Amino acid sequence: MYPIKIFSGSANRPLADRVCQYLDQPMGKMIVEKFPDGESFCRIEEDVRGKDVFIIQPTCRPVNDTLMELLVMIDCCRRASADRITAVIPYFGYARQDRKDEGRVPISAKLCANLLECAGANRVVALDLHSAQIQGFFDIPLDHLSASPILDEYINSLGYSPDEVVVVSPDAGSIKRAVKHVEALGGSLAIIDKRRLSGSEVEQAHLIGGPIEGRVAFLFDDMISTGGSICGAAKVVKEMGAKKVIVAASHGILCGPAIERLQEAPIDQVVLSDTIPLLPEHHIPKIKVLSCAPILGEVIKRIHNHESISQMFKTLKFATGQYY
């Protein structure tokens, strides 16, 4: 096999370090910095000619900077004659702009896919895309992963029996995700009818399914941005009589009033993966972070060795001891 090389951008170096630790591989030597005027720059400090290169970089805040940095790193590796370049994007920015929901607006997720291909990426790995249809925006292979195994393993470790669990979908779009969590955790399923009033305001009107009263409610979503949707859903299930409310999401964007809303909401715990690094002000007692490094590391190993990725979710367990 061609030797493997793993590089990291500046967006989430701690996650990349944990992936390298899982793989028992050293981090590749690359200088990533900005010129005084803000332009992104990188320089590879070792030979990558003929190597199988993986670049780990979520396109999280500041989104435009981290996206441009990823493109520059891909171009740098391509021009240095890497054999194959895989962009490992734990959080894919612009994913919510995946369609024209009104006239004269862009499909920015498709634009990002085009940019990654033009830069020279041969393959993309992404975790819990906001919309599965984004896979079709790429003309190169895309491996769409999920943080669900680590979330479910942690929740199972809490020791609740299926009889006292209800899995709640915060909106109709998350029903498929909620059903998969019911299969893993047991319990019943409930769905909240959410109406979006604006880009930042939503209203939770009705709850379908259950029962809720006296049970531990687990609310799953792909991301927590401003926290309006998930906090509103938590309020609904608490009013319905849930004895405990635990929220779990793959991506903790946590922008605007998110932390304040989570603090005030009737939520006992918020479980996130480490696709996006938390800011210092985000470290509150309610928030628990689990590392997705074992999933990303195993996928990188299997891509490099030309092994099945879908099979790994059927046969492997990801240790809950990875959370921190």
Image (tube, rainbow, N blue to C red):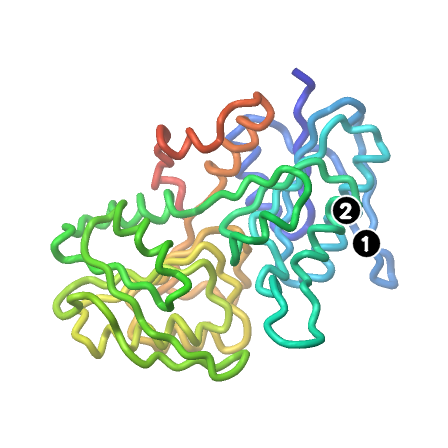
Tell which of 257 and 35 is nearer to you. Answer: 257
**Picture quadrant where residue 304 is located:** top right
Q: Is residue 4 left or right of residue 115?
A: left
* Residue 301 as seen in the image, left or right of residue 82: left
Q: Is tag 1's residue or tag 2's residue first in the polypeptide sequence?
A: 2
Q: Position of residue 222 (x, y in %)?
A: 45, 58
Q: Which mark is residue 32?
A: 2
* Side (left or right) of 306 relative to 75: left
Q: Amino acid at mark 1?
A: Ser
- Residue occupying image coordinates x 53% and y 26%: 302
Location of residue 288 (image quadrant): bottom left
Q: Are marks 1 and 2 in contact (CB under 8 Å)?
A: yes
Q: Nearer the viewer, mark 1 or mark 2?
A: 1
Q: Where in the figure is residue 172, as x and y percent of width and height?
A: 37, 66
Q: Secondary structure at mark 2?
A: strand
Residue neighbourhood size for the residue with mark 1, other residues' Cα within 10 Å, grouped as few (<14), some (14–19), many (≥20):
some
Q: Position of residue 120 (x, y in %)?
A: 78, 40
**Looking at the image, which is closer to me, 188 or 73?**
188
Q: CA distance from mark 1 to mark 2?
A: 8 Å
The one nearer the camera, 11 or 146, is 146
- Say which amino acid is labelled 2: Val
Quadrant of the snapshot with the N terminus:
top right
**Residue of label 1:** 40
Residue 178 occupies which quadrant of the picture?
bottom left
Residue lying at 41% horizontally and 61% vertically, measured from the top left: 221
- x%, y% of residue 72? 80, 47
